[in-house]
Amino acid sequence: MFQNFLALAIILYCCGSCANAQSIPPSAATPAPPATPITLDEAIRRAEAVETTYNSGLADAGVAAAQRGIARSGLLPGVVYHNGYLFTQGVSIPIGQPVRNGQSTPGVRFISNNAIHEYFSQGIVSETVSGAGLADYRRTNAEAAAAQARLEISRRGLVSTVVGFYYDVLSADTKVAVANRALAEATRFGTITRQREAGGEVAHADTVRADLQEQQRKRELNDAELSANKARVDLGVLLFPDPTTPYSLASTLDQMPTLPTRAEVETAAKTNNPDLRAALESLRAADFEVTASKFGYVPDLSMNVFYGIDSPQFAVYAPDGSRNLGYAASATLDIPVWDWFATHNRVKQSTILRKQAANELTLTQRRLIASLDELYREASVSLAQMVLLDQSVQTAAESLHLTNLRYTAGEGTVLEVVDAQNSLVSAESSRADGAVRYYVALAGLQTLTGNMP
C-alpha cells in the first residue's frame, strides 16, 4: 500500500515538473554579432593606422619637415635677452693717495673688464649672413620633399598589399561557394544514380563512382573553407585588434574596373610616380649639399645689436643721474684662410654623393619604364583572359546541363557527368583566380601612376 502511494506521488511530481517546464519559455540563444561590412577604402584606412612600415615613413616625413623648419629658423635673426654679473678684482690705492688718471673709482686688474661690479641686462639681435646656411635650408627642403615622396611610396605599397589580401578573401569566398554548389551537384547526381540502380537502369559501378565524387567534393569544400579562413585572418591582422573578428566584404568579383589606355598610364607615371619624385628630390638635395660645401671658401658676416645696460649698477640710472641704458652694434667678417683641406674634402665628399644620387635617378627611370611595360601587359592579358574565363564558365555550365540530360535519358556515362562537373568547378575556380590576378596587376599599375583608391 505504501509503495503504491509512493509511486503515485512520484508520478504526480514528475507531471508537475513537466508542466512547469513547458510553461517557462525557452531562453533564446544569444545571436552572434553581425559581421562588419568592410569596403576597400575602409580596409586601407584601417591598415594605415596600424602598419609599421607606413607609420615609420610617416615619422620620417615629419622629422624631415621639422628639420626644414630648423634650417629656416637659422636664416632668420635671433633675439636673446642676456643677463649676467661680472666681479673683478680691483686695484688697491693707499690711503691718502689720489686716484690716478682722473678716475672717480679705483681701477680693475683685468683691463678687459670695466668695473669691479659689472651688470649685463641686454636684448641681443644677431644675424649671420652665410651662403652655406641658405644652401642648407634648400637642401633640407629637398630632403623633406624626398621624405614625403618615400612616404607616398610606402602608402602605395601598403595599398597594393591590402588590395591583394582583400581580393584574396573574395576569391576564397567565391571558391567556397563553388565548392558548395559542386557538393550539391554531386549529391544530386548520387541520388539519381542510386535511383537508376534501384530501377535496374545502371550498374552499381555508377553509384560507386558517384559516391566517390561526392566524397571528393566534401574534401574540396573543407579545403576551401580552410583557405578562406586563412585569407580572412591575414586581412584581419591589418583591420582589427583581434584578427579573428568576423567581418564581410562589401565588394564582389563580378564587375571588373576598366583599364586606362597606355598613353594615360605613361602620362600619369611621369607626373605622379613617387619613386621618380623621391630620386629627383634626392639629387636636388645632393646638389645643394655640394653648394653648401663650396661656401666654406667664402667669408661669413655676423652682425649683432645690443640694447640694455652694461654698468656697475643694476639700474636704469647711475648714482650721478646719468642713464645706464644704451645700445651697441658689432659686425664680424670671418675670412677662411687655412683649415687643413677640410673644406676641400667636404666638397669632394658631397660631389661623390651627388654622383651616386644621379646614378640612382637613372636606375629609377629605367626601372619605371620596365615596370610600367610589364605591369601594363600583365593587366591587359589578365583582363582579356577574364573574358575567356567567363565564356569557359558558361560553356562548362551548359556542358554539365546537357550531360546530365543525356545521362538521365540513358545516353551518357557516369564518367562524362563527372568530367563535366570537374570542368565546371575548374572553370569557376580559375575565374576567381583570374579576377584576383587582374586586381593585383591593376593595383601594381596604380602604384606607379598614382591613381590609387
Image (tube, helix red, strand yellow):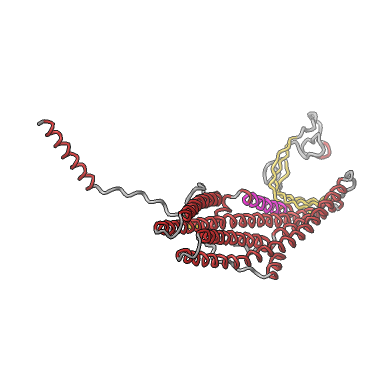
Instruction: Give how far across and how far down residue 128 sits, in percent.
Output: 78, 52
Which one is nearer the viewer's eye here, 102 or 117?
117
Residue 437 can be seen, yes or no: yes
Question: Quick check: 399 left or right of 80?
Answer: left
Quarter of the view holding residue 108? top right
Q: Quadrant of the N terminus?
A: top left
**Residue 222's x, y, as percent?**
50, 50
Residue 270 placement: quadrant: bottom right
Q: Please say whether residue 44 is visible from this viewpoint.
A: no
On the rendered structure, is 125 left or right of 230? right
Q: Is residue 437 above or below residue 229?
A: below
* Residue 437 or residue 389, whichever sits in front: 389
What are the residue bounds of the magenta stretch? 54-72
Q: Residue furthest left?
A: 1
Return the x and y of residue 53 as percentages of the image width and height: 64, 49
Identify the residue shown where x is 78% and y is 57%: 363
Kindly identify the residue that appears in the image at 74 percent across and 35 percent down. Answer: 87
Q: Residue at x 57, y 52 (%)?
A: 49
Q: Is residue 68 magenta?
A: yes
Nearest the viewer among 445 and 224 is 224
Percent of width and height locating residue 264 = 68, 70
**In screen coordinates, is 395 left or right of 320?**
left
Residue at image location 19% in from the left, 40% down from the top: 14
The reply to whether the magenta stretch includes residue 134 is no
Residue extending furthest toward the top: 94
Q: Nearer the viewer, residue 175 or 189?
A: 189
Q: Main secondary structure of the magenta part?
A: helix
